Image (cartoon, grey):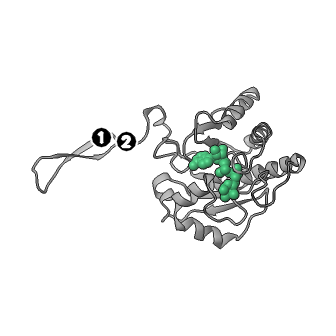
Amino acid sequence: KTQETVSSSSGMANQKIKVSEDPVPSSISQDNSDVPTLAFPSISTADFQFNLEKASDIIVQKVEEFMDKLGNARLVLVDLTERSKILSLVRAKAAEKNIDSKRFFTFVGDICQLYTKGGLRCNVIANAANWRLKPGGGGVNAAIFNAAGAALETATMDRAKTLHPGNALVVPLPSTSPLYHKEGVTHVIHVLGPNMNPNRPNCLDNDYIKGCKVLEDAYSSLFKGFLSVAN
Ligand code: AR6
């Protein structure tokens, strides 16, 4: 695991070459568990402009609801930066409700590099998708489709051509995908949340009665999908 050296057999005799370095920060390198783990982004709160207070309430409420069905599996809410408002809101509200922090916690990092950069093993990751289930559009959707390569697009299209708001689609990742062999991700779950952005399809025009219902359904579908492949 630690840095190794080998002697070069060609050219300069006895030259030391670095061949591998442990990519896992020591603080979490003990996270070598094979515990089923779902990493998920906060659905709808960036490009889809959903209210963060309301979204954080829904995340914590849905996590709490699924806690006793989880067994030893883990749920991890991920965002790109330590300054993430949604992560702090959710952390505070989860602490208030005494949610078991071993089975639900937040994590800062790129959802496509949780193991190689962060040392966190997550066999399932969620995507904040678009209704066409297509790559691009920025945000976490673009990042996941990019990192997973064409294998994800094909596997997704084999299962569905579109997704309705509030629904999730579980896609087994082919082992040819770099996300599978580098990061250990075996499934991607596409989730379509409610959209409050007038420049995106199916905008709910600030209707938070409908919006909250759709976001609740989205997390229920996501967590059910995860449970269906977790054990
Ligand atoms: N790793 C972890 N979290 C991320 C990453 C990443 N690589 N990239 C973004 N986030 P968004 P939405 C966080 O906008 O609001 C797309 O265009 C981000 O900070 O990706 O549901 C789709 O095609 C935020 O907390 O999703 C849809 O059309 C969260 O992920 C539309 O955006 C979700 O941000 C969906 O919009």
* Residue extending furthest toward the bottom: 158
Q: Is residue 140 above or below residue 92?
A: below
- The image quadrant that residue 204 belongs to is bottom right
Marking on residue 3:
1
- x%, y% of residue 85? 68, 35
- In the image, taking residue 4 as reference, residue 206 lies left or right, namely right
Please name the residue shown 16% across and 52% down the image: 8
The secondary structure type at the circle numbered 2 is loop
According to the picture, the residue beneath numbered tag 2 turns out to be 22
The image position of residue 154, as x and y in percent, is 59, 71
Task: Name the amino acid, label 1.
Answer: Gln
User: Which quadrant of the figure contains the N terminus?
Assistant: top left
The amino acid on which the numbered mark 2 sits, given as a three-letter code, is Asp
Q: Is residue 227 visible?
A: no
User: In this view of the protein, can residue 93 be seen by the observer?
Assistant: yes
Q: Is residue 217 above or below residue 2?
A: below
The answer to whether the residue labelled 2 contacts the one labelled 1, judged by CB atoms less than 8 Å apart, is: yes
In this view of the protein, which residue sits in the foreground, 170 or 196? 196
Q: Which residue is located at x 63 percent, y 63 percent?
A: 171
Residue 219 placed where, x, y %? 75, 49
